[in-house]
Each structure stands twice: as C-alpha cells, then as structure tokens.
Image (cartoon, rainbow, N blue to C red):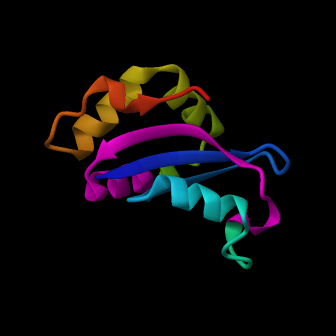
C-alpha cells in the first residue's frame, strides 16, 4: 500500500505533491535535502499538508498526477478542508473503496 501526499515548506511557501510506498522515509528525504539538485533542495522545513494513506501505489500515482496538473494553491486548500473532494479522487482513480479514516489532515 502507498500514500499520496502534499508537503509544504513554510520558508519557501511552496508545495510538493507526490506518492510513495514509504511516506515517512520520503518525508525525511525531503527534510534532509537528500536530492540536492531537486525542486525541494532550497528548503528543509517540509511538513505534511495533506495525506491519503493505505491506497494502492497506482492509485496514489494517478492522484498525484491529477493534482499536479491542477497547479492551484486553492485546490490544495480545498483538499484539506473538504474531505468529499479526497473521497471523489480516490473513487475516480481507484476501483477499491477507501475507508474515510485513511485521510489525514489538516496538520
């Protein structure tokens, strides 16, 4: 199982959208500048903004691709404040029902 996530850097006021089979390790890599030439390299204060846990990796990847296309701070905020949007995303990109307790946020 995997995780779809959005992390936020307060110092850069930027978001990063991704998916991972090991979210905790991925978050540590974001925070420790594991990829020094990457998008996230200017900041080490990444914190979880929105997370959907325990979904198939292909579903997490599809949701991440969709959310990245949106490129909208307002959309990210709406994911966090309106759980129905997250439910609709998981239903649209997954044939397996996701339990509402899988959603985490706001942080």
Judged left or right of residue 62, residue 94 is left
| Foreground pick, 31 / 61 | 31
Residue 84 in the image: state x and y as whole percent: 37, 21
Q: Which residues are magenta?
A: 40-66
As drawn, the residue found furthest toward the bottom would be: 37
The image quadrant that residue 78 belongs to is top right
Judged left or right of residue 42, residue 82 is left
Could you tell me which residue is drawn at 15 percent across and 40 percent down? 96
As drawn, the residue found furthest toward the left would be: 95
**Which quadrant: the C terminus?**
top right
In the image, residue 97 sits, relative to residue 100, either above or below, namely below
Judged left or right of residue 32, residue 48 is left
Could you tell me which residue is drawn at 32 percent across and 28 percent down? 87
Residue 41 in the image: state x and y as whole percent: 75, 68
The image quadrant that residue 83 belongs to is top left
Could you tell me which residue is drawn at 23 percent across and 35 percent down? 91
Residue 5 in the image: state x and y as whole percent: 50, 47
Any magenta on residue 59? yes
């Amino acid at each position: 199982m995997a995780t779809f996530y959005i992390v936020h850097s307060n110092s850069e006021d930027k978001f990063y959208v991704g998916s991972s089979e090991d979210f905790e390790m991925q978050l540590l890599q974001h925070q420790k500048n594991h990829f020094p030439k990457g998008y996230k390299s200017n900041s080490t204060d990444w914190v979880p903004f929105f997370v959907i846990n325990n979904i198939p990796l292909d579903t997490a990847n599809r949701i991440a691709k969709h959310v990245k296309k949106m490129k909208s701070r307002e959309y990210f905020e709406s994911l966090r404040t309106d759980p129905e949007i997250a439910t609709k995303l998981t239903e649209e990109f997954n044939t397996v029902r996701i339990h509402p307790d899988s959603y985490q946020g706001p942080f």
